[in-house]
Image (spheres, helix red, strand yellow):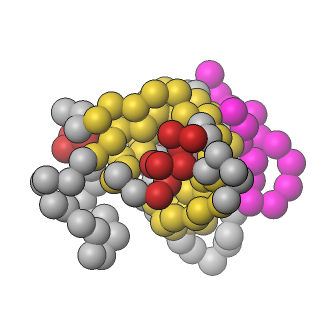
Amino acid sequence: MNLQEYFETHTGDGVLATADGQGRVNGALYARPHVMDGRTVAFIMGDRLSHANLMQNPCAAYIFIPKGPRREGLRLYLTMARQEEDSPLVPELRRRGGPAGEARDPSQKKFLVYFTVDKVLPLVGASVPVAQ
């Protein structure tokens, strides 16, 4: 599966699931990931609970449900690889039309968090190979 092509051609809703060091789970709405290469995706994150959880536990899952009559989305299993605080790439990567009410306060810290894609699964069913 080519993630770059998939996320360029599908719109929908996504949830990023993280857990802290004690295993307490959090889920948060997130836009489509930015595909950096075949095995790396990135999310723009504020200094909030999801980001704090990743500082304690680098594992996460992202569930994407595309718009349309068929609910054939993806589940991405991720491991945080690195982050950049207030990265100059954030303004370039930010998509127009983000979630309503999204804070765009320039004084808030923004992190560009990179993840290795460990596994890709459909919402329901068997494993899907990740293109290199």
**Relative to residue 56, is residue 77 drawn left or right?**
right
Query: Which quarter of the image is occupied by the N terminus?
Result: top right
Whether the magenta-drawn stretch holds residue 40 is answered as no
Q: Position of residue 116 (x, y in %)?
A: 58, 30
Looking at the image, which residue sits at the far left?
Answer: 106
Residue 121: image location, x then y, percent: 75, 48
**Dominant secondary structure, magenta:** loop
Q: Which residue is drawn at 33% across and 53% down?
A: 46
Residues in magenta, as a range: 118-132
Q: Which of 53 and 22 is in front in this view?
A: 22
- As rendered, which of 30 and 22 lies closer to the eye? 22
In the image, 38 versus 103, the foreground residue is: 103
Residue sitting at x 58%, y 64%? 27
Image vertical order of residue 29 relative to residue 68, above or below:
above
The quadrant of the rendering that contains the C terminus is top right
- Is 71 placed left or right of 36 in the picture? right
